[in-house]
Amino acid sequence: MMNGRTSTEFSPGLVRQSLPRELLKRFPSRSVDKLLLFSALALGVFGVLMIFSATRADNPATYYLKRQLLFLIVGVVVMFLAASFDYRKMMPYSRIIYAISIGLLLVVMVTPARGGAHRWLPLPFFDPQPSEFAKIAVIIMLATFFADRHMEIGSNREFLQALGIAGIPMFLIFLEPDLGVTLSVFVILLGMLLIGGARLRQLAVLAAGTAVAVVAALGLHLLKSYQVTRLLVFINPDMDPLHAGYNLMQSKIAIGSGQLVGRGLFRGTQTNLKFIPAHHTDFIFSVVGEQLGFIGGTVLLALFALLLWRSFKIALTARDPFGTMLAVGILVMFLFQIVVNVGMTMGIMPVTGITLPFMSYGGSSLIVNFFCVGLLLNIGMRRFPQGT
Amino acid sequence: MRIAKRAGLKLRPAETTYSRPDSSEENLRRRVAILGIIIVTAFVVLFARLWFMQIVSGNDYRKRAEGNSIREISLEAPRGRILDRNGQVIVKNRNAPTISVVPAEMGDERKAVVSRLSRLLGMGVDEINQKIDKSQSPNQRAVLIRNDVGEDDITYVSEHRQEFPGVIAGTRPVRDYPYASLAAHVIGYLGEISPEALEEKKSKGYEAGDEIGLSGIENTYDEELRGRVGSLRLEVDAQGNSIREISRREPAAGVSVRTTIDKNVQELVEASLDMGVQMARARQDAESPKPYQATGASAVVMDPKTGEVIAMASYPSYDLNSFVGGISEKMWQELIAPANLYPLNNRAIMSEIPPGSTFKVVPALAALTEGTFDIHSPFDCNHVFTTGEFKDYPKTCWSTHHHLDLFNGIIQSCDVVFYNIGYNFYNRQKDIQGRPLWEYARDFQLGKATGIDLTSEMNGRIPSPEWKKEFNKKNPDFQVWYPGDTVNMAIGQGDILTTPLQMAYVYAGIANGGKFVRPHVMKTLEDVDGEVVNEAEPEVATELDMGPEHLAQVTQALTGVVQGKGTAAATFEGFPVNQVPVAGKTGTSEIMGKQPTAWFCCFAPANDPKYVVAVAIEQGGHGGESAAPVARRILEGLFDLPAQGEIRPSTGD
């Protein structure tokens, strides 16, 4: 029954074998979640295609295509690497990972602002976004935290500790500013608290506290409308307050005009005539909707559903709380970003600058997403008790 | 293996190693269920929204996407020109630098754009908004804001495209009237199509926002003149930059109208009429403390054989240029103010006035045709007419003519002669003998529009017992047809009304031997290359059989009007009647409470009529003193005769 399952310990006899063969041996085909692998790869390819379609008119036409393709390849390699070691080995290193990510968030604060935001580390080939990496660092840290407590954090102190783990990077990311990622981390926290054993009363207080803070700031006119606008512009400089409504309308027109079968890949006036803002990043779903129609949109949603279903399954079948919590964190992150981003393009969610996993252009998020899928595969593969 | 088992919502498959207390597991099961429900709900919502947008509302969004990216620009077709009969251009087009806006493209920024335009053009914000709102265009069509703006303004807008979304700065063809007010009433003015007219003409390709001829030839021949609007469909990006041309339909220039008007004669007629009005205004009205008001005047020159109107003038007139690019509200108010005597009205076809003695040719010819009188039938005028019923209601003649025959009755315009003829008609009609006078009047095409190719022509009125009954439907006491009704009609008074053109038409019919050729102002329609695409055929409305000898007798009498004892003799003193015999008739018609209208109708040469001239000066005095001099000036010009230095007014009728 355990045949073909390799030990997570390196066996000296295998060292001389070639690395690919060694890696392959680490992925017993029977226990790899092929549907998850398929959905992630399909989404990655789908994304590259749509980014190419959205940016063909740019000069040079293949700039974004080439870069995203490269990110995809890197992402896939990272995914396999992330699946190749026993995920439980990360637990002792979670504090270090977390500390490094906080450090990067601090470093990014002193980088030159681009578009009013300090989000990118200026490196030669590509500029990583520490906030994207912070998301997974927070997930690993929280998963370790919950696993250490056997998924029971009944005490308020532990609850506050969990809040703190997420709160520090949230605060730093908010200062960048990047509202989308800040919200993502917050929702990841909520999801992990829910599954991780926080009391419903604690969750209720947290939810109520957040609501009161938001309502107090906006609803009771403690802030004047222009201040709200300024605040929104501050925390999300991508959003042009004068044109937010216009952009959203153009996105809706794009999706609606796709009708059943779409205007055809590479076609469609909303995309090609640049009516859709940020069509290769935040509004990539509008491009899918316009060009590929209801059929294309449904296929994309189905791929996401498949991804989430498999993630959910892996969370349920993980062999230990760490695996479960890791998977839950990743699942919630994907879920939140998909729902808010797709909902935004269709006008049922606010414009907050949240990217669509695997689809939106961007190296950091694509690589992190594939890393997450790698962890999921890892957890799924190692759900059985180890013989050795 | 155990895949089937594991596929379920199993929290802890047998092979997992970690375990928790049961209560905790139960708790976790519930929490995981919540997460599952959230995932499923979220996807159902996204899917439903996608369905709603693409399948349910997809058509609407598709249309909006197309409206977004396709801009349709109409290419205005140059309107056909208007020429005089000799090919002189009297109305043309020029390209005017223009600022227009496409309301739909201003979108949310309308307020800002309008205020910027207001500053640039020095126009009020309200004025601009009014223009935009007034236009019924369904928003894709450019609305003209101002014509003839400076080149600087055009350049400024072109260089600041971002600040002026939806604003078009360029040129567009507009009307140009080199002679300003010349023949303004025949030409007519342009304006934006009214909703009613649009409804009526939609099937002919008219669109909201179209400029359309509202009067004159511009109105009658609008469909020919307007040409066909071209269109340009452009694909534009989100910034409004044109990406490519999708299709282009070149505008087709309108057909030109060559009128029957002779520009030189028109100028002559307008100048003569103006002179006549000024002279009348300088003359004291004997029966009033004021001089004659001359509240309006008109003159028509036509060719009796072809029906061509060679000149048609109406006083006061207006400058057609004030309508270019849409008339300003201020100017419009001036044009419709009563104090300014309604310059837009074409009095030659719109003024309904009793014809007075100019009408006498009709009862004369009617009596000769009936055979009740001949041209030498004797009459006796001792200033009053007291025959029969008129014993108690005597009618007076403007003079005392003593013994005279019908021939001289025409020359001297003796009312008593025509009272007798009228009374004779009354008695015969009562006895149901012969045809009544009003039928003869209608034979002369009176009481109905001549059918000239100009809009707003009035019918005039020929009274009859039936008409009187109908007219006084609510006043039974006034329905009776009295002898006075026929007798008054015989001198062109009472309820009879005619337009100056109708009287010109009567004289044209007589001049043409009873053949009435319908008056018209369009000679030919010509395309851009000058090729004739349509030609007006002379249309014979009726051919009266009045006996050539009777026509000759009356014409002979009319030639006596301008000489000897004739009512216009003084005016035509020195006119070479042997060279150009003139057959004319004066008329002075009374309207209760107003000063008399001066009439003069004539044709010349009497033996081979080339021109009919009719002049009417409303509240301008007597025909001989006010209208005849105008006619003489016109005839001098028409026949290239030396102009008399000063024309004497003829006193009398």
Image: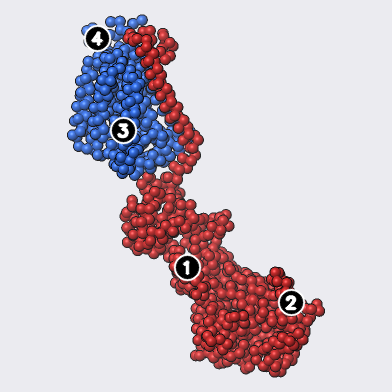
Chain colours: A blue, B red
Q: Nearer the viewer, mark 1 or mark 2?
A: 2
Give the Cα separation between the discs numbered 1 and 2: 44 Å
- Inspect this view and state whether residue B163 appears: yes
Q: Earlier in the sequence, mark 1 or mark 2?
A: 1
Chain ID, mark 2: B
Q: Which residue is mark 4?
A: A9
Neighbours of disc 4 within 10 Å: few (<14), some (14-19), many (20+): few
Residue B351 falls in image quadrant: bottom right
Q: Is B437 situated above or below A301?
A: below
Q: Which residue is mark 2?
A: B481
Residue A213 falls in image quadrant: top left
Neighbours of disc 2 within 10 Å: few (<14), some (14-19), many (20+): some
Give the Cα separation between the discs numbered 2 and 4: 131 Å
Q: Secondary structure at mark 3?
A: helix
Q: Nearer the viewer, residue B502 or B316?
A: B316
Q: Amino acid at mark 4?
A: Glu
Question: Which quadrant would the C terminus of chain B be assigned to in this image?
Answer: bottom right
Q: Nearer the viewer, residue B535 or A268?
A: A268
Q: Which residue is mark 1?
A: B332
What x and y, as percent, mark residue A121? 21, 32
What x and y, as percent, mark residue B133? 45, 56
Q: Which mark is residue A213?
A: 3
Chain ID, mark 3: A
Q: Nearer the viewer, mark 3 or mark 2?
A: 3
Chain ID, mark 1: B
Lateral position of residue B454 relative to residue B427, left or right? left
Q: Amino acid at mark 2?
A: Trp
Are callouts 3 and 4 both on one chain? yes
Chain ID, mark 4: A
